[in-house]
Image (cartoon, grey):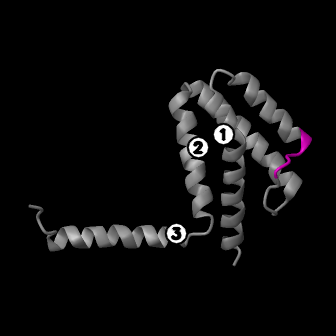
Amino acid sequence: MTNPKTGDEASGAKRASDFNDSLQNVPAFEAMMSTLRLGQSAQSQLRKCEYDEYLELSQQAGRLLHASTGQKQPTPGWCPEAEEVQQQVNEKFKDYPEVTQNFRAFVQNAHVAITQARATGKK
């Protein structure tokens, strides 16, 4: 026999549901969450020094992506300079196929999240 939820448990579940619903209304929530998931995945696979280098390369690619697209959403094709960064990642982290495969999505999701957060802040 299951116990009925007490008032505290029910209200806690309701608060959690309300909190989750409010997060869904945050601009670029999905992009932020994808960035966090992909970053955590890379961090769990790489040594700290490797992860630090991965982050530096992602920032470099992000700056190039931002410069090539301005405030627009990223396009599937990266500028040649960003493609070079992707190749560096492919070479440096070749022993981590998931990390190299997710690099582009990591950078693009971060770009979307930052761009939308900045646009929201200007309103």
Q: Residue furthest left?
A: 1
Provide the residue designation for mark 3.
24
Chain-order first, disc 3 or disc 2: 3
Q: Residue at x 54, y 73 (%)?
A: 25
Residue 52 visible at all: no
- Label for residue 102? 1
* SS assignment for the magenta stretch, majority: loop
Q: Amino acid at mark 2?
A: Leu
Q: Residue at x 22, y 71 (%)?
A: 10
Q: CA distance from mark 1 to mark 3?
A: 23 Å
**What residue span does the magenta drawing correspond to?**
76-80
Few, some or many residues within 10 Å of mark 3 (<14, 14–19, 20+): few
As for residue 18 lying within the magenta part, the answer is no
Q: Amino acid at mark 1?
A: Asn
Q: Reply above or below: 34 against 26.
A: above
Q: Reply above or below: 115 against 59.
A: below
Query: Residue 11 location in percent, x, y?
Result: 24, 73
Pick the quarter of the image with the N terminus: bottom left
Pick the quarter of the image with the C terminus: bottom right
Query: Residue 100 location in percent, x, y?
Result: 68, 32
- Label for residue 122? none
Q: Amino acid at mark 3?
A: Gln
Q: CA distance from mark 3 to mark 2?
A: 19 Å
Few, some or many residues within 10 Å of mark 2 (<14, 14–19, 20+): many
Q: Nearer the viewer, residue 12 or 98?
A: 98
Query: Residue 90 location in percent, x, y?
Result: 74, 28
Provide the residue designation for mark 2.
38
Is disc 1 placed on a helix, strand or loop?
helix
